[in-house]
Image: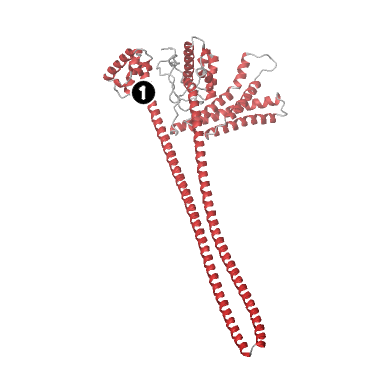
């Protein structure tokens, strides 16, 4: 064994014992060495009651019930005897020495003390029977019983003379029955507790011989057992032996100067007062680093989930914004089209009215001119009538009528032209309005197409979000399934390790009984390793044999493997 190898400890940990202050539920034994550094005394498994740790059957037989009834009757008789013997002595002593005013008050005092003791004892036994024990109620019972013993002993003290040996005996005899009664009550309480709670773990007691030989070290062991809930005395001895062996290994490694060891290597000595084993203390840094890594992974997962939710929310917000913008553009295009149509129609109507008014004014002006010219012609005709004959006047009147007809014809033609121009202007205005409406419709169609594209993008974003949600749910389900499979594999591996440890322990016990030599033990261990890999010796690497048996030579490991194969061929099975 080199100084850097793993230290060999006193004994293997009991498979059913676990430290109450363990950081993790997984316990790794520090060593697999079957030998022991210190042989525990043969009475280390002795319990407080001395009756072993196997629980009795839950139901009593008929004989056991009769026996229990007889014990209860005897205890009641013992209580009655104690009350009878102490009542008179305590009452008289209370009246005469304790300054009670009368004997009756002294008797009431004695009755009160005895009744108080009986009531508290009855409550204690009842609560123990109901599986709800009251631990502190025993102490006032002991205190009142001690007071009764003192009062009884004081009532038998000699008066007016020195104490003699017989006086001490008499004083002690007055306290025998109360003390005996309390012992019977405690025995009954413990019996009731074991009957109603058979599965309760019992705590081993420390042998009195150890208290005598090593009182200080034993007191430390007692304190650690009580503080950290270690009920097995052999387990506590194994932990101490393991810690001593580890400390010696550190001293050998650092040539006697243990202060050179690292903080992690000193953890077993620092954590031992807190109920940690050597293996648990050495595993603490790795377990804490693993816990920190798990916390970091959980924080990273939460951050990624938050980023994903934020991106989805942004996409949804953008889709809503585009959808609202499309609706606004569509309404705006519709309003612009209607407004353009109304404006074009209004402009056409105004233009037609202006042209009609201009034509009407021009016709009026021509009529006024024609009337003025007619008046002038009439004046000239009247003047000509004076110079010419009456026939010339008729001719001129006919000419005037002809000219007036011509003017009417021109005015009608002007009205026709004006009506045609107005109709042409109105047709062009309507065409312009229709073109503007068509442009507005085209813009509205483009707006609707943009809104449809926005809705399609929003639907695509929703589909991608749903797909991401589905993929995340599938990933979470796969992760949960992987965790369950890992837990199941870990449980199967733990069960396999436990079975292997049990086989190893039985084999070590058989080897201890057979008192085999170290080489024979090593060969049998290699045989068990071969069985663990399927029974084929060639499948067991020599490096594993060197590591397990702490040998440096491959040749020695090969010899061990060859002898183990021959041992298995001879029928060896652990």
Q: Which residue is drawn at 50% across and 58% down?
A: 439
* Rendered location of residue 374, percent (x, y): 64, 81
Determine the image quadrant of residue 529.
Answer: top left
Q: In the figure, is residue 124 to the left or right of 498?
A: right
- Residue at the spot of label 1: 503
Q: In which quarter of the image is the N terminus?
A: top left
Q: Is residue 374 above or below residue 447?
A: below
Residue at the front extreme? 387
Q: In which quarter of the image is the C terminus?
A: top left
Q: In the figure, is residue 238 to the left or right of 86?
A: left
Residue at the bottom extreme? 390
| Camera-nearest residue between 251 and 383 | 383
* Rendered location of residue 148, percent (x, y): 63, 25
Q: In the figure, is residue 90 to the left or right of 323?
A: right
Q: In the figure, is residue 190 to the left or right of 503?
A: right
Q: Residue at x 65, y 29 (%)?
A: 110
Q: Is residue 465 visible?
A: yes
Classify mark 1: helix, strand or loop: helix
Q: Is residue 22 visible?
A: no
Tag 1: Cα neighbours inside 10 Å, few (<14), some, or many (≥20)? Answer: some
Q: In this view, does 373 lie above or below 428?
A: below
Q: Which residue is drawn at 35% across and 12% down?
A: 553
């Amino acid at each position: 064994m080199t100084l850097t190898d793993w230290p060999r400890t006193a004994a293997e940990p009991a498979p059913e014992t676990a430290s109450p202050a363990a950081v993790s539920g997984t316990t790794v034994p520090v060593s697999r060495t079957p030998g022991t550094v210190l042989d525990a005394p043969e009475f280390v498994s002795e319990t407080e009651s001395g009756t072993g740790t196997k629980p009795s059957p839950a139901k009593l037989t008929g004989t056991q019930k009769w026996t229990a009834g007889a014990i209860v009757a005897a205890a009641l008789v013992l209580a009655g005897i104690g009350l009878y013997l102490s009542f008179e002595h305590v009452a008289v002593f209370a009246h005469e020495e304790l300054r009670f005013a009368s004997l009756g008050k002294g008797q009431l005092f004695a009755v009160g003390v005895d009744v108080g003791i009986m009531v508290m004892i009855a409550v204690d036994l009842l609560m123990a029977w109901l599986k709800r024990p009251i631990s502190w109620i025993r102490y006032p019972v002991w205190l009142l019983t001690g007071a009764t013993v003192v009062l009884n002993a004081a009532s038998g003290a000699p008066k007016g003379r020195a104490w003699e040996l017989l006086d001490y005996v008499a004083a002690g005899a007055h306290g025998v029955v109360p003390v005996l009664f309390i012992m019977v009550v405690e025995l009954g309480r413990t019996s009731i507790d074991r009957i109603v709670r058979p599965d309760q773990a019992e705590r081993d007691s420390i042998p009195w011989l150890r208290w005598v030989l090593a009182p200080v070290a034993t007191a430390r062991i007692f304190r650690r057992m009580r503080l950290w809930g270690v009920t097995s005395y052999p387990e506590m001895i194994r932990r101490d032996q393991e810690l001593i062996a580890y400390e010696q290994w550190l001293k050998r490694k650092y040539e006697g100067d243990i202060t050179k060891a690292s903080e992690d290597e000193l953890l077993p000595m620092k954590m031992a007062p807190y109920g940690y084993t050597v293996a648990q203390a050495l595993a603490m840094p790795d377990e804490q680093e693993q816990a920190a890594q798990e916390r970091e992974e959980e924080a990273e997962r939460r951050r990624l989930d938050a980023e994903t939710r934020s991106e989805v929310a942004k996409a949804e917000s953008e889709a809503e914004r585009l959808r609202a913008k499309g609706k606004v553009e569509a309404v705006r295009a519709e309003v612009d089209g209607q407004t353009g149509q109304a404006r074009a129609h209004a402009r056409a109507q105004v233009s037609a009215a202006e042209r009609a008014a201009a034509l009407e004014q021009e016709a009026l002006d021509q009529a006024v001119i024609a009337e003025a010219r007619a008046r002038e012609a009439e004046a000239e005709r009247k003047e000509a009538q004076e110079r010419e004959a009456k026939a010339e006047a008729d001719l001129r009147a006919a000419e005037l009528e002809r000219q007036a007809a011509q003017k009417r014809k021109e005015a009608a033609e002007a009205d026709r032209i004006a009506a045609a121009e107005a109709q042409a202007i109105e047709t062009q205005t309507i065409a312009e309005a229709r073109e503007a409406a068509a442009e507005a419709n085209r813009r509205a169609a483009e707006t609707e197409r943009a809104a449809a594209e926005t809705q399609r993008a929003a639907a695509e974003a929703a589909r991608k979000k749903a797909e991401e949600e589905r993929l995340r749910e599938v990933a979470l389900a796969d992760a949960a399934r992987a965790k369950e499979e890992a837990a199941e594999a870990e449980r199967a591996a733990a069960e396999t390790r436990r079975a292997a440890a049990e086989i190893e322990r039985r084999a070590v016990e058989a080897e201890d009984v057979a008192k085999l030599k170290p080489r024979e033990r090593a060969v049998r261990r290699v045989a068990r390793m071969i069985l663990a890999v399927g029974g084929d010796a060639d499948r067991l690497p020599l490096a594993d044999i060197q590591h397990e048996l702490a040998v440096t030579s491959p040749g020695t490991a090969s010899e061990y493997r060859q002898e183990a194969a021959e041992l298995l061929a001879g029928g060896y099975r652990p």
